[in-house]
Image (tube, rainbow, N blue to C red):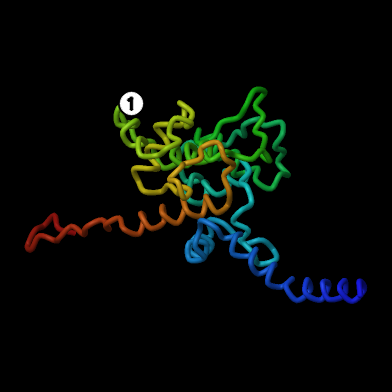
Amino acid sequence: MRKLLGTLSLVLLLQNFPAIVQAQVPEQNAGVSSEAIKQVVAAKLMTNSPDGNFYPQREISRAELAAILVKAFRLDKREAAQQEKSISVPDVPPSYWAFNDIQIVLKTDIMKGYRGNLFFPNQKVTRAEGLAIFAQAYGVFQFSDDSVNETLASYPDAASIPTWARKAIATVVSEGFINTDAQNNISPLRPMTRGDMVYLLSKYLQRQQQLPETPEVPRVPDSPESP
C-alpha cells in the first residue's frame, strides 16, 4: 500500500511539473513588457542571450552599462571621445570585450574610475548608480534643492536615495523614465537589472520619437540670397 501511494505521489508530481515550470516563466518578465524588450533590442541598444532569451532579472555590470550608454547616446561622437591617447585602466586590458566603450565613458566623464584608475568592469551597479549615470549621459537638470525634494517627495523611500544621486534621479523622474515597485518605491540601493534598463531605455526612445523635427526654413520668393 505504501509503495502504491509513493508511486501515485510521483505520478502527480510529474504531471504537475510542467505547470510549475510555466508558472515561473512570467516572473522573469516582471516589471517590464515584452514590447519594451522588443523595442530596445530592435534599436540595438541591448541584445538577447545566445539562447534567444533576454533574462530581464539579470543584474547589470559596469561594463554592460558603459556599452549600453555609448550606443544609446552615441557617446563615441562626442568631442571628448575623439582623444587618441587611451586612459590607463589596469583592470581593463585592450583585449577586454568592452575596452573601447569603457574608454569612451571615461573620456567623456560619463563614468569614473576608482582609486588606482581601476574600473571594476564586472561589478554590479545599484539602481541609484545606474539611474545617476544614465542621467549624466542624458543631461542632469540643474534643479534647486527644494525642487529636487519636491520631485522626489511622492516616493516612500526617497530618503534612502544617496545625496550624490538625488539631483540626477530627480531628472530621470521628471522625464518619466523611472520604474517603481508596487508601493511606488524607487529602491535606489537594489541592484539594477536588465529589465530596469529596458524600462529606462524604452521610455527614452519614446521621448526621442516625440521630439519635433527641425522645421524647414521657407524660401523667400525672388530673393537673391535664397538657396
Image vertical order of residue 164 relative to residue 42, above or below: above
**Quarter of the rendering containing residue 155:** top left
How far across and how far down the image is residue 159, in percent? 44, 30
164 left or right, relative to 123: left
Compare residues 10 and 110 and report the one nearer the observer: 10
**Quarter of the rendering containing residue 29:** bottom right
How far across and how far down the image is residue 213, in percent? 27, 58
- Residue at 43 percent of width and 47 percent of height: 178
SS at badge 1 = helix
* Residue that badge 1 annotates: 145
- Residue at 54 percent of width and 62 percent of height: 41
Residue 26 in view in this figure: yes
Image vertical order of residue 179 relative to residue 157, above or below: below
How far across and how far down the image is residue 20, in percent? 69, 67
- Residue at 72 percent of width and 73 percent of height: 16
- Residue at 31 percent of width and 58 percent of height: 210
Image vertical order of residue 88 relative to residue 11, above or below: above
Residue that lies at the very extreme toward the top in this rendered image: 115
Compare residues 11 and 127 and report the one nearer the observer: 11
Q: Amino acid at mark 1?
A: Asp
Residue 81 in view in this figure: no
